[in-house]
Image (spheres, rainbow, N blue to C red):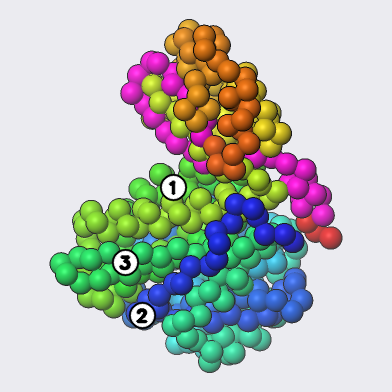
Amino acid sequence: MAVSPLAPAQFPDLPQIDGVTFAATAAGVKYKDRLDVMLAVLQAGTSVAGVFTRSATRSAPVLDCQSKLGGDNAGAAAILVNSGNSNAFTGKNGDSSVAAITSAVAAATGVAQDRVFTASTGVIGEPLPHDRITTKIAELTQNQSPSAIEQAARAIMTTDTFAKGATATVMIDGKPVQIAGIAKGSGMIAPDMATMLVFIFTDAKISQTDLQTLVSGLNAKTFNCITVDSDTSTSDSLIVAATGASDVDVTGNVDFADTLHTIMRDLAHQVVRDGEGATKFVAVQVSGAQDDADAHKVALAIANSPLVKTAIAGEDANWGRVVMAVGKSGAVADRDRLSIRFGNITVAENGWRALDYSEDAASAYMKNAELEIGVDLGIGEGQSTVWTCDLTHGYIAINADYRS
C-alpha cells in the first residue's frame, strides 16, 4: 500500500520514557510475517487514564479497560495491543479472550490482572485467536526494551500507511518532563470519545484522578475534533500513562497541560493525514455561532459531508455544498448573516456570493494539499475547529477489499 501523500517525512525519534518498556512481535493474528502484537510494561506507581468509544457495540477490550480505570496506582501496569482482529461483537468469546490474555500477561510480568489493559483493532465479528497471542507473551516479556516504542507503533497498524508518533519535552521547575505517544487510525474515524488507538507515555508525576480530568478535557479539543468518514469505531481507545519516574509533580501545571495538548493534537492530525485514500488535509473553522456546541455541529456537518469531501477531492471550489452542510447541521443559522471563505478568499458573505468572488482564485486555492474552510455564522461568539480529509476513489477501493 502506498504511503499517504500527507504523511510526515519520517517517524519521529521518540525518547525513552523512564518507567516504561516495550516489545513487539509477529503472532499471526491475521497478518503473516508482520508485527501485530505489542506489550508495554509500566513501573509501580504509574497512573493510567483513558477515554473510550461511546459506541453501543463497543468491544470486549474496551469494556474491560473501562471497568479497570479509576483504581489506585500503587502497582505496576501493562498494556497489550493486537492488530488484525478487533475482538468486537464476539459475545462471551470476546470476554474469555480478554481474560485469557490479561491472565497470561499478569503471570508473565507479575502485574496484577486488574492493571493489565488491552486493546484490539481490525475486523469486527471474528473470534479472536487469542492463543496466538498468549503463546507470544513470554517472548514479549523477555524482550522488553525502553527503546522499542517504534516497533510498538508498527505493531498496532491495520490499514495505516505509516506509523504515527509524537514527542515533546517540557521544563518544569528546571527539570525535564518527557512525553511520547503513538497512534493508529486511518478509517472508521469519527471518534465519540478519543480516537482509534492512542497510547501516550510520560515520566510526569500526577494522580490518576487529576490525569483523567486533564485527558478527558484535552480529548474534547483534539481527538473528538477529527473525522475521516463519520463512522465511530467499536474499539476507539486513548490511554495515557504517567510513570512518575521524573518525580516532577505536574498537577495543575499549565505548561504540562499545553504540551500534552500539543502531542494529542499532533497524533490526531496524523490520523487524518492517513485517512484512507486521502490527498487533502482540511481544517474546518467555524465562528460566530450561537455557542461552541452549535459551532461544533456546523463544523462536523461540513467535515462529514460526502458532497463537500468529494468536491475537495476534485479540487472543485463548490462552496454551495458548504451552504448545504450549514443548513442541515441543526445549528441556529441565519442565511443572510452567513459568510464562507476558502483560505483567505471570501467566496460568500451576507447570505450570497461575495461581490469580488473569483472562481479562478478559488479553484487555484483548492489545488493545495492543505486547505482551510472558514464559516462565520454572524450570530454569536461560538467557535470550533474540526480536521478532516477528502473522499476519493481510494477510500472505496480500500474498504471494498478490507476483509479479503
Camera-near label (1 vs 3) is 3
Residue visible at 55% across and 62% down? 9
Q: Amino acid at mark 1?
A: Thr
Separation of residues labelled 1 and 3 (CA atoms): 19 Å
**Of the numbered discs in the image, which one, if any, rests on residue 13?**
none
Q: Which residue is mark 2?
A: 19
Q: Which residue is mark 3?
A: 169
Residue visible at 65% across and 55% down? 4
Crowding near the residue tagged with mark 3, few <14, some 14–19, many ≥20 C-alpha atoms within 10 Å: some
Q: Is residue 370 visible?
A: yes
Crowding near the residue tagged with mark 1, few <14, some 14–19, many ≥20 C-alpha atoms within 10 Å: many
Separation of residues labelled 2 and 3 (CA atoms): 16 Å
Q: Quadrant of the N terminus?
A: bottom right
**Depth check, front residue: 123 or 105:** 123
Rendered position, 188 above or below 366: below
Residue visible at 59% across and 90% down? 139
